[in-house]
Amino acid sequence: MKMARRFFASLLIVIAPLVLSVARTSGDNSKAAQYFAFIGTYTAKTDSKGIYSFRFDSDTGRLTSLAVAATTTDPSFLTVARNEKYLYAVNELSEFDGKKSGAVTSYSIDAKSGKLVQLNQVASGGADPCYVSFDQSDKYLLVANYTGGSVSTFPVAADGHIGPAAAFVQHTGSGPNKERQQGPHAHYIATSADNRFVFAVDLGLDEVAVYRFDPATGSLTPNDPPFAKLAPGAGPRHLAFHPNGKFAYVLNEVNPTVTALAYDSKSGSFSTLQTLSTISKDFTAHNDTAEIVVHPSGKFLYASNRGHDSIAEFTIDSAKGTLKLAGDFPTMGKTPRNFALDPTGKFLLAANQESNNIVVFRIDPATGALSATGEVAQVPAPVDIVFVPAK
């Protein structure tokens, strides 16, 4: 077996200020043991009813099903406010209120039961929104509209309600892959750690668009330079920063590869270091990537493969930012669209969309290797996982 060891180590909560693409949680939850795990799903052509809730024990790795936390349509991607009172979901729709737009929905969280109560819902500004995150102040939501090829920002009130859009930017252009890149496809959006810049990864344009962000108004202004260019036909999907803030890593879906970038925090600009495949050369079947995460130690990077149905592990040279493919680990399911680390960094949860399950792995803190705990939760078409401490 090639590349079967040394895998996933603790992740997530330490790099939340830098990267909002990881399994998003909020606050200092390092001492908590009981969490709610909220699962975003696809409801179209599946048995899913919306957002599901589970109770997760970070001491044992036990994942216990609770209920349908909220009935809603295609809540594919989620994020949680840092005050842990509110959860937000994009509804990945092609039409909303008679317009070519998806939606963004806000919920209050019952800290005892894990139930979600809808507060309000607004149009996302473009069709099929697929990513949502907060700015560093938690005053604005940022949304990427995939089919619409656009990005939007929305103010969030103290009571959790979403206000009218503060900014909207329509991407234009296309890429060389006529099937996948016939137009812009915004797939990820998040702010920099200092809240000065917004990064929007566009699969259709082979670009990471960079905007100057005004945290007082939510406005977006093209940076100089306005984007970082990836290889033609790469199809970039998600981005993750190194904890030191000097490097960033773009997961390319169409290739499939990962590109290491050096980041200049003063100018908000990137320069390419290297690009590596996420799968071994002996795998010839079709493969798409999905999620990317950097270990908080800065030593490891992980990326999920759909087709190969695995997580690829790379070691990181923390001085140079370069990568080396170290191994891969089967996710024990089909099509791992998302994976997340629990807030303590002890466990990894792999969301296998087409096998309708979430598999829990224990993380070896020394090597990052994964071992199955035996915990397998049944969830229809899981897409995204976020955690909130249970009271």
Image (cartoon, helix red, strand yellow):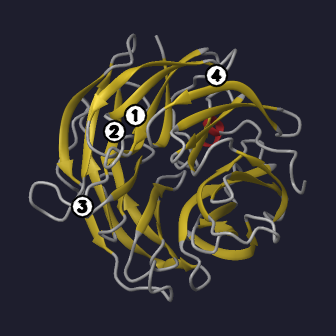
Q: Give the labeled residue for mark 2.
A: 88
Q: Is residue 16 something that shows in the picture?
A: no
Q: Amino acid at mark 1?
A: Ala
Q: Are marks 4 and 2 in contact (CB under 8 Å)?
A: no
**Amino acid on which disc 2 is placed:** Tyr
Query: Residue visible at 26% across and 51% down?
Result: 154
Separation of disc 2 and disc 1 at Cα?
A: 8 Å
> What residue does disc 4 label?
30
Q: Which of the two marks, 3 or 2, is nearer to us in this view?
A: 3
Q: Is residue 132 visible?
A: yes
- Looking at the image, residue 233 lies above or below residue 105: below
Q: Is residue 71 above or below residue 253?
A: above
Q: Residues within 10 Å of mark 1 (few under 14, many from 20)?
A: many
- Give me the disc on residue 94: 3
Q: What crowding class fits label 2: few (fewer than 14 Cα within 10 Å), some (14-19), or many (20 or more)?
A: many
Secondary structure of the residue carrying tag 2 is: strand
